[in-house]
Amino acid sequence: MATKSVTLDKPMRSVWDGGESPMKASYGKLMMWFFLLSDAFTFSALLISYGMIRYSNPANVSAATDAGYRASQSEWPIPDMVFNAVPFLHGVHLPLVFVGIMTFILIMSSVTMVLAVEAGHRMDRRAVEKYLLWTIIGGATFLGCQAWEWSHFIHGTDEGILLADGTRFFGANLYMNEYGPQLFADLFFFITGFHGTHVFSGIVLLVLIFFNAATGVYERRGHYEMVEKVGLYWHFVDLVWVFVFTFFYLI
Amino acid sequence: MAHHEHDEVVVTPQPADKAHIRKIWMTALILGVVTAIEFLIAFTVDNATFRIAVFIGLTIVKAFYIVAEFMHMKYETKSLIWSILIPTIFIIWLIIALLVEGGEVLDARF
């Protein structure tokens, strides 16, 4: 009888009524997830705009003709014909090779990041330091590659394009470019630049948590959750690159 | 009372979980192999529609492994998973809306 009255008196409570964490995640981690969701909207808007603008321009089909591929100001360029340079191999047509290397570097830095998170769960400070350093090196190498890629894009090919006044124009800026419609260069700068800014912010965060881990802040705190949160951000940056790689370089 | 905040805390790290670390490397291997397949298709297949369909499919495969394993979403609670995934239907809507729009602009211009 007593047991029955206790169950009846107990108010109806769900896990959402307070005092519990229904999602079994801390406030900080949850907010990182929602920030990443909003960042996913921003990147989607940029990439989908790219798709829409590309689709509203005729495709460059000159690669199939006898004369071979020629850039045109009114036709959308073929990425393979624009992004085909590799450092130290000047003038060699190597489509996708350099972005392939960049993709590999970023995926590897993502792997070392998970390994750092895993080491944090075990409270293994030395392993956290080691893997965070590898992640920082990977991220910095990726940024360096991107700087080279931008420099090549800005300075252009040996041929350039012939302008109406008889002069030649090489490379690209926000007003002119030799590769195709102006929006192609603008979107390249904006999308890869926005992603590069994210990589840069990620490296700043990684340096901060490396410093904190090395000085024992997380050991005194009793957990390495900050490494997990920055890890979420870093994987998101990798995730965005997977999409940029497909929509900007592959298709 | 003295503050002991900066005293060294003695923490003994736990041994590494071999199975977990193997899983991380397996995920990395899958991502690498999928990227390699994308390269292979980029250099060998000429059919544009087929290429685009396969590239988008493989990109979603890679995105799944990054989000599910690396970002650990697979192991979160159902409510957290759906709170993140359901809002992305707006992205799908934007894709459909803007690609239709792009086709219309192309028709209007040329």
Image: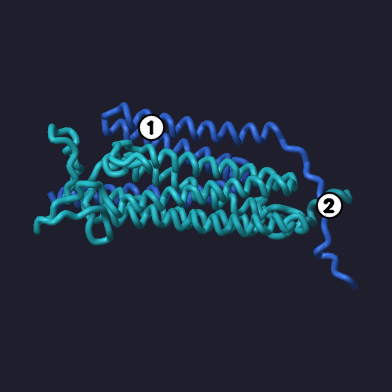
Chain colours: A cyan, B blue
Q: Residue A244 placed where, x, y %? A: 39, 46
Say left or right for A126 vs A142: right
Instruction: Give the chain letter at badge 2.
Output: B
At 19% from the left and 45% from the top, the residue drawn is A71
Residue at numbered disc 1: B39
Mark 1 and mark 2: Cα distance apart in space? 49 Å
At 34% from the left and 48% from the top, the residue drawn is B95
| Most distant residue in the left direction | A165
Q: Earlier in the sequence, mark 1 or mark 2?
A: 2
Say left or right for A4 vs A205: right
At 68% from the left and 55% from the top, the residue drawn is A21
Residue at numbered disc 2: B10
Label 1 secondary element: helix
Q: Residue A234 placed where, x, y %? A: 54, 50
| Most distant residue in the bottom direction | B1
Q: Are marks 1 and 2 in contact (CB under 8 Å)?
A: no
Choose between B88 and B57: the one closer to the eye. Answer: B57
Choose between A29 and B37: the one closer to the eye. Answer: B37
Q: Is residue A88 visible?
A: yes
The C terminus of chain A sits in image quarter: top left
Instruction: Give the chain letter at badge 1.
Output: B
Mark number for residue B27? none
- Amino acid carrying label 2: it is Val
Total numbered labels placed on residues in the image: 2
Q: Is residue B104 visible?
A: no
In the rendered image, which quarter is residue A87 located in? top left
Image vertical order of residue A245 relative to residue B36, above or below: below
Say left or right for A25 vs A75: right
Label 2 secondary element: loop
- Amino acid carrying label 1: it is Phe
Q: Residue B32 placed where, x, y %? A: 49, 33
